[in-house]
Amino acid sequence: MPVITNIDDLKQIYRRRVPKMFYDYAESGSWSEQTFRENTADFAQLHLKQRVAIDMTGRNLATRMIGQEVAMPVGLAPVGLTGMQHADGEIKAARAAERFGVPFTLSTMSICSIEDVAENTQKPFWFQVYTLKDDDFMQRLFDRAKAAKCSAAMITVDLQMMGQRHKDLKNGLSAPPKLTAKSVANMMTKVQWGLGMLGTKRRFFGNIVGHAKGVTDPSSLSAWTAEAFDQALDWDRIRVFRRMWDGPLIIKGIMDVRDAREALNVGADAIIVSNHGGRQLDGALSAIRALPEIVDAVGERIEVHFDSGIRSGQDVLKALAMGARGTYIGRSFVYGLGAMGEAGVSRALEVIARELDTTMGLCGRRDVHDLDRDVLLIPKGFVGDWA
């Protein structure tokens, strides 16, 4: 087993072990992938201020996200098709997060169902929903999340229509995967992945098939998906969803101050500054560049969290220094899952925590609550008036 010292090490193993269509699903953005690339590249523009001769002992990463105690301000973001990256992937990722003491968020478009994850974990997890047209199905999703004792709901608001992702279209992405000569040839080279998939019954969207009206088997899923997302979504519709769920509510996909204020007005407990990992509007700002303006506008009245582009503990520190009170990793934990299963997700979290802890100390800070923009050298024009 190679020595794993950073997230990229996990990514290299992941690439070798997972079929191309699922690697490409995770490691891609929409259209030209400009925003996908800038989400990570723009972190490098933020330099850190090194401090010396400051007591670095007794460092603390623990905090709270929407009132929940967490070992560090990092959650596992909702990622669709996680159970195609590794057999029973959502269960394995949830277990790793539970053991580490950070939130796991289950996607509506997961392979393992809400009930699957609840039956195989001990502590509450969070559940993410898309904005769908069918009120009955939406209510049943929230009811199932309540029955599973999910401690928070997350509404993703930036997917009323899907950004075009060229790699997914060319690969014929589906769950279970379509068996073409090309895909079969590639899957035959991924022996561990294939054996895992043969050993599980969970190979299609467990929250949809058998639950959504008219979706009785995987073959009827594509037609439902094409019609399900609500292009007429507005903030009044989100208020309807707020009434369906009476627990802590997080709204994910905020990139504009005006939308942040609307989320505050509908009664959200937190918002996530996110551009869907560069998978929706290509050419949008990187999430880290959008974050400070939103924090400055609403950060005193609502928890502002951050997602998109984090590949290290240093990235986490920079997002926290910019004002985020919580962060999320998606691809970073998927790399670990595809590389090594549950142990790989644990390793990804360990890497992030170690990097965050060490960087914080070298910046002369002992507590995540003490991070602010003074630890950063921010280039001119990075934060400003975008008009």
Image (spheres, rainbow, N blue to C red):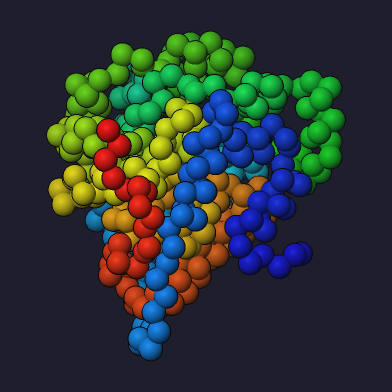
State the residue in front, 51 or 74: 51
For residue 174, side relative to residue 234 (left or right): right
The reply to whether residue 284 is in sight is: yes
- Name the quadrant containing residue 293: top left
Question: How many numbered tags mark residues here?
Answer: 0
For residue 305, side relative to residue 284 (left or right): left
Q: Is residue 241 above or below residue 120?
A: above
Give the quarter of the figure containing the C terminus. top left
Task: Locate residue 56, reporting x and y percent.
Answer: 38, 84
Instruction: State the residue at coordinates (84%, 22%).
Output: 181
Give the quarter of the figure containing the N terminus. bottom right
The reply to whether residue 113 is in sight is: no
State the residue in front, 386 or 315: 386
Q: Is residue 61 above or below residue 330?
A: below
Q: Is residue 348 above or below residue 145?
A: below
Q: Residue furthest front?
A: 380
- Name the quadrant containing residue 317: bottom left
Task: Locate residue 199, reporting x and y percent.
Answer: 72, 41
State the residue in front, 340 or 258: 258
Instruction: State the residue at coordinates (19%, 26%).
Output: 239
Instruction: State the residue at coordinates (25%, 20%).
Output: 234
- Name the quadrant containing residue 51: bottom left
Q: Is residue 299 above or below residue 170?
A: below
Task: Locate residue 113, reporting x and y percent.
Answer: 49, 35
Instruction: State the residue at coordinates (41%, 37%).
Output: 285
Task: Locate residue 361, reporting x and y percent.
Answer: 41, 77
